[in-house]
Amino acid sequence: MSDSTTLSAPRVVAKRKRRAGQRRALLYAALLALGLVAPFLAYPVFLMKILCFALFACAFNLLLGYAGLLSFGHAAFLATGGYVTGYLLASYPGLTPELGILAGTLCATLLGALFGVLSIRRQGIYFAMVTLALAQLMFFFFIQAPFTGGEDGLHGVPRGELFGIISLRNHLSMYYVVFAIFVLGFALIQRTVHSPFGQVLKAIRENEPRAISLGYNVDAYKLVAFVLSAALAGLAGSTKTIVFQLASLTDAHWHMSGEVILMTLLGGVGTLLGPIAGAGLVVSLQHLLAQSPMGNWVSVILGAIFVVCVLSFRSGIVGELTALYRKNFK
Amino acid sequence: MTQKMTMPRKALVTSIAFAAAAATTSAQAEISDGEVRIGYLADMSGTYRDLAGPGGLTALEMAVADFGGSVNGAPIVLFSADDRNSADVGANTVREWIDQRNVDMVAGLVASSVTIAVTKVLEENDRLGIVSGSAASSVTNEHCTPNHIHWVYDTYPLANGTARAVVEQGGDSWFLLTADYAFGHALEADVTRVVEESGGEVVGSVRHPFPTSDFSSYILQAQGSGAKIVGLANAGADTVNAITTASQFGLTQSGQQLAGLLIFLNDVHALGLEATQNLLLTTGWYWDMDDQAREWAQRYFDEVGSMPTMVQAGIYSSTMHYLEAVQAAGTDDAQAVRAQMASQPINDFFARNGRIREDGRMVHDMYLAQVKTPEESTGEWDLYEILSTIPAEQAYRPLSESQCKLVQN
Amino acid sequence: MTMIFGVPMAVFMGQLTLGLVNGAFYALLSLGLAVIFGLLKIVNFAHGAQYMLGAFAALLAFNYLGINYWLALVLVPLTVGGLSMLIERFLLRRIAHLDHLYGLLLTFGLALIFEGTLINFFGVSGARYATPEILQGGLNLGFMFLPTYRAWVLVAALAMCLFTWFMIERTRLGAYLRAGTENSQLMQAFGVNVPLLITLTYGFGVGLAAFAGVLAAPLYPVSPTMGSSLLIVVFAVVVIGGMGSILGAILTGLGMGVIEGLTKVYYPEAANTVIFLVMILVLMLRPAGLFGKEA
């Protein structure tokens, strides 16, 4: 994204790159600092919700923004992570939360591998539809399986003690755990995108036949991206379940798959920070509207945002801001 | 984005706070923050909107206004939120209400999944909840807490009242259409038990996905079963769809009869009498059942434009009882108010012979009703005829069968 | 009642018939989607909402204007289809040059707006639309009692499908449409007004959805959410049939109705899910769908 090079002199390019890198490091440092002080400025539970959805959206964006694959079934991974973690922690009191999260993420990863193998050869609309269909099968499974509590949901998941020592009942300590998980997840995505692997993904997104002719095993690359995305989505679901101490069908419904698209689109597809901004905005919006007299209009307003975004702000908040910055400060 | 969280936004608060005149300060000191804060949580935009929704909020506001807007000089403040039928959203909203706004009581509570999630949060933080909309009897059974009261109805009396009455009238063979999720399964089990206890038999059942829009196939199976009664162990749109389809397939003309187990005034109104006539059902309240009910319903009707469901009436009734208890106890502390509420019998326009049991169940008289035929009905909302009263002590699950942790068996 | 209930063959036949009736709905709806996809390459996520709008328009026209069922069957598809041409002209056209996934997202947003708005005005309980007098009652088929209205739905939907097929396969306009589906730039070069053709096609596809909505109005409670649950099923049907294939949409619609109907007898819990299973299997074996051409 940032390495658009039109200058020929290699030294100038290198200098620019270094400057851009410094600026990016500065931005990340500022955001990190903001994340650390945020729970003292705002309600921690609300922030944790944003972080969980931000991680979910980042995971989704890895697939859509960098591999060009629109999955319409990501809710399945979020829900799998959530249900597995929730079930284990609720049924085995001795289990510590980090093990619960690990197990949930692992299950989502395996499911991701299965979905990936079945869907990765399809393209565009077909890919979206296959993932939707697979997610619908999972939804059916979650309704039928006794351990999920069906419509009632899975309740009373204990937050427990991290590593058996740190109690997470306190919102503040819970927040820092969620924040740490988010930062780890984000760092993994950031590393992936900027690695040679990420570059190949982008090449595939831009021109698949060319990538094939260059000798890349396109399907394998896509599959790895898919599994990674599913794992991170599962991680988000597992974390969310511990924070809210419940898992429900809402997370498995196809509307959730739609919502994560909205977050990513709103924030900026294919930008690293976009999904975070998008998730923050959508969650805040839902939160504000739900408690206002305009509450009945939530879906209408979300719909309108969808339409306006697609028509006018396709590069999303972060995309538009970056463009603005490039235009005025360079 | 972050700033809004630090301070409750005035604009978001439906404040019915009336300037309290110089009040007795002694009582005020007992009420946290000098305000009684009530949060109304319900589905305002989805499936259960017409059952509770915005109308329930109006009922709540009516109760607060009728009470005078303050308790012992402490103003009553209302918050409201849409739970969008999501346990996540509901539990989160309530957690935030408690953490940020120190809300004392949560009213409304419709979808069972939301209710169960919310009551866990209430128990953790020792606040009070009054559940008016949920159907699941598990709310005061395996999911009971010392922090909530279930006010209007649950599946136990619905199955008990309707199924028993139907069997006694000769409908001794049943076919059940069951919504395929926890609630439907529970209702199916309850009905089966009651039917068998009363000497009837369940000859078959079919579990349909939730939700289902086309019931023709299931109705055909019900017709093929030869059962006298087709029981609907589902709710909301599923019930409405099933009844519509049954009338199209001439189910009742061919000698079978429908029994709705969870059906509300708004459902019958939407379906029309042509499709629902003669349907037997159990209800906790009906607007036209007596003068007291009619008087209140008329006031509600003038505000909202439709007649209240039993849930909306229950929200008014429970809020009144709550406010009276806060006044009498002189505090809004959850356990003190809960004890005060339980110490007083409830007899108002809504509940007869009502009392709150230790499991949090408010037991009161229930009614067996039959939907009128188009010829019998005299107006848009003249829909039920009350056939008999099911006494409070017989209607609900006896404590001896309770799995609630608060009940010593 | 002289019907032979309880006999497996009779039950089977009954379910088969009902499956065909439902299948006719699927066929009609997926036909609209397929037509739109064929030319615009857009997955019209608002299709369910537009079907719902058809049913609502019929209801409101009857309640406020006194327009009867038969008139509504003609007027409503024209109105809803006509209005949707504005959507195509002013919204979809602006993003036509982009990745087609944007069209999917835009129409998804529109669906949310339509549904949410109607919920605010009419609630979700749904209202009843009276079955026209002449179609009340039922037919005794020997193995089952089939309400006349359902028989009519089957006939009307199939007639409409046939009409559409004829239009597309056997008329000049249809030839343009097919050619446009293959290569719209070439068509433009030959002097055909392709943008107009696209607008008309979108209007026609949506009109089919609205027609299905009017047909459905007397069957199901008319409620703002009636389309959203149907939508993803219809998607599945289109994908199974092969996106953009007219015949595929019709035949698959009918076939899926029957499969779903039989599932309701043997494993009712899975009735909503079986179509997705079929879809996955079909795409494993034939990536372009049963009747689609390999891209």
Image: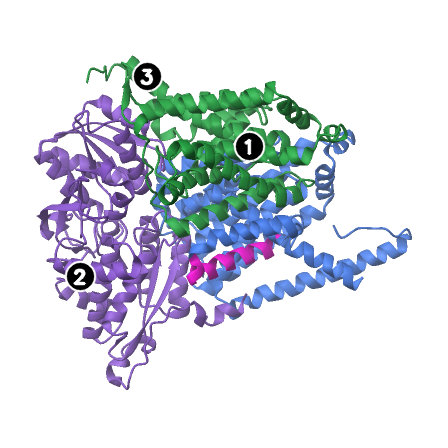
| The color chain B is rendered in | purple
Q: Chain of mark 1?
A: C
Quarter placement of the C terminus of chain C: top right
Residue A223 vs B346, above or below: the answer is: above
Residue B71 location in percent, x, y?
Answer: 25, 75
Q: Which chain is blue?
A: A
Q: Nearer the viewer, mark 2 or mark 3?
A: 2
Residue at the disc numbered 3: C12
Same chain assignment for discs 3 and 1: yes
The answer to whether residue A200 is left or right of residue B237 is right
Residue A155 showing in the rendered view: yes
At label 1, which amino acid type do we have? Phe
Q: Which mark is residue B195?
A: none
Q: Which chain is green?
A: C
Magenta range? A275-295
Q: Which mark is residue C204?
A: 1
What secondary structure is the stretch in magenta mostly built from? helix
